[in-house]
Image (tube, rainbow, N blue to C red):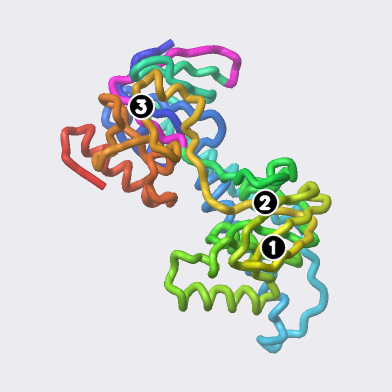
């Protein structure tokens, strides 16, 4: 069984898989280690499945608004199982496409959990129960990020939904409370509202999507409130009680005012944290920032020779197209170029 590779990739995100397919097609020996999501977050649990769900919600919204178009509505029944299964079918097709790409390119996909055990050396506990030790002349880290759960009393114990669980719901939440007024919270909140949920969005900032221009933020809030979504801004969560899926109670400070918000489900969408702990980076001499992101220079080189990092885990903006651009940079630099971010 092969142990030495020209390029070894830890994590099958957008940048990592493109590097693997491209370099393998050029004749390099390449292996990709992935513990769960073939193709990364985007086709499995993020961009594409969320847009699938959102499209179903858009269709539902046309029904609710049908009188505006001169159409008399009769009855509309939202089938969350059907919506979820439609999404799952799409994801299954995307996974098959990715497997076909690996086969066609010649890159080896290794299913299992990998961690560094030395410089440019990764031990993999494979899904079939074996252990493999792999070495690469060049190593690419592409481990991504996950939803951040803030250290608020009672929050973790409430077992809140993240975007992953929200996209797997088989029932419409009666009242969904959403922590976070960024794009993930807004798009999922609007979708669930259009399916029939009562929705309240709670944000610590003075406006939703607070990094946008003020007029944009205000208009987005107006549109959401016009659909019946509650918005509570300038907040600080004091503590959480209950269990998401049963009942949830948020104790909130808004300025000098104390609020208590009740719901049946709780979704956390307050940011991301990197998947960099527990993978032996210190053994590979790869340093991280205070926030846990891998330290890279403008060429996406880490603090270890011939080890690179791409995508979210490198602190790049959390977008698929950014990870794809990281692929462009590393591909050219591996070939002797001087590309930079």
Q: What residue is drawn where x is 59% and y is 58%?
A: 180
CA separation in Å, label 2 and label 3: 34 Å
Left or right? Give the position of 132 relative to 226. left
Q: List the residue tagged with mark 2.
A: 166
Expressed as whole percent of the image width and height from the top left, the position of residue 333 reads: 21, 36
Numbered label attached to residue 83:
none
Q: Which one is closest to the eye, mark 1 or mark 3?
A: 3
**Between disc 2 and disc 3, whose residue precedes?**
2
- Magenta residues, dominant SS class: strand
Expressed as whole percent of the image width and height from the top left, the position of residue 108 reads: 42, 25
CB atoms of marks 1 and 2 within 8 Å = yes
Expressed as whole percent of the image width and height from the top left, the position of residue 216 reads: 47, 75
Q: Quadrant of residue 54?
A: bottom right
Q: List the residue tagged with mark 3.
A: 286
Expressed as whole percent of the image width and height from the top left, the position of residue 311 reads: 39, 42
Left or right? Give the position of 308 relative to 83. left
Helix or strand or loop: what does disc 1 sit on?
A: helix
Image quadrant holding the N terminus, namely top left
CA separation in Å, label 1 and label 2: 9 Å
Crowd class of label 2 (few under 14; some 14 to 19; many from 20; radius 10 Å): many
Q: What residue is drawn where x is 73% and y is 41%?
A: 157
Farthest residue in the front direction? 256
Please report the bounds of the magenta region as a residue range: 127-143
Q: List the residue tagged with mark 1.
A: 192
- Looking at the picture, does residue 102 appear above or below residue 218? above
- Looking at the picture, does residue 313 appear above or below residue 237? above
- Looking at the picture, does residue 116 appear above or below residue 193? above
**Between disc 1 and disc 2, whose residue precedes?**
2
**Magenta segment: does it hold 139?**
yes
Q: What residue is drawn where x is 40% and y is 24%?
A: 31
Is any atom of residue 54 visible in this view?
Answer: no
Crowd class of label 1 (few under 14; some 14 to 19; many from 20; radius 10 Å): many
């Amino acid at each position: 069984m092969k142990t030495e590779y020209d390029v070894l990739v830890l994590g099958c995100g957008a940048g990592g898989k493109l590097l693997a397919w491209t370099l393998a097609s050029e004749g390099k020996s390449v292996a990709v280690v992935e513990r769960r999501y073939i193709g990364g977050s985007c086709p499995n649990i993020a961009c594409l499945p969320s847009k699938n769900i959102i499209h179903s919600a858009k269709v539902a919204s046309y029904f609710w608004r049908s009188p505006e178009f001169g159409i008399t509505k009769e009855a509309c029944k939202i089938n969350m199982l059907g919506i979820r299964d439609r999404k799952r079918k799409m994801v299954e097709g995307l996974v098959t496409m990715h497997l076909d790409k690996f086969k066609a390119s010649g890159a080896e996909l290794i299913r299992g959990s990998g961690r560094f055990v030395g410089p440019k050396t990764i031990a993999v506990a494979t899904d079939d129960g074996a252990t493999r030790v792999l070495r690469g002349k060049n190593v690419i880290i592409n481990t991504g990020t996950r939803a951040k759960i803030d250290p608020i009393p009672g929050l973790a114990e409430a077992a809140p939904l993240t975007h992953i669980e929200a996209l797997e719901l088989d029932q419409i939440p009666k009242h969904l409370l959403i922590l976070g007024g960024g794009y993930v919270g807004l798009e999922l909140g609007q979708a669930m509202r259009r399916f029939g949920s009562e929705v309240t969005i709670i944000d610590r900032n003075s406006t939703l999507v607070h990094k946008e221009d003020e007029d944009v933020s205000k208009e987005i809030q107006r549109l959401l409130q016009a659909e019946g979504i509650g918005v509570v801004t300038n907040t600080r969560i004091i503590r959480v009680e209950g269990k998401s899926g049963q009942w949830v109670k948020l104790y909130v400070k808004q300025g000098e005012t104390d609020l208590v918000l009740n719901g049946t489900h709780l979704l956390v969408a307050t940011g991301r944290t990197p998947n960099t702990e527990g993978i032996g980076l210190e053994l590979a001499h790869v340093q991280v920032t205070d926030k846990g992101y891998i330290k890279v220079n403008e060429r996406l080189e880490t603090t270890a020779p011939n080890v690179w990092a791409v995508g979210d885990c490198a602190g790049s903006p959390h977008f698929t197209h950014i990870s794809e651009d990281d692929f462009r940079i590393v591909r050219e630099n591996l070939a002797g170029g001087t590309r930079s971010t």
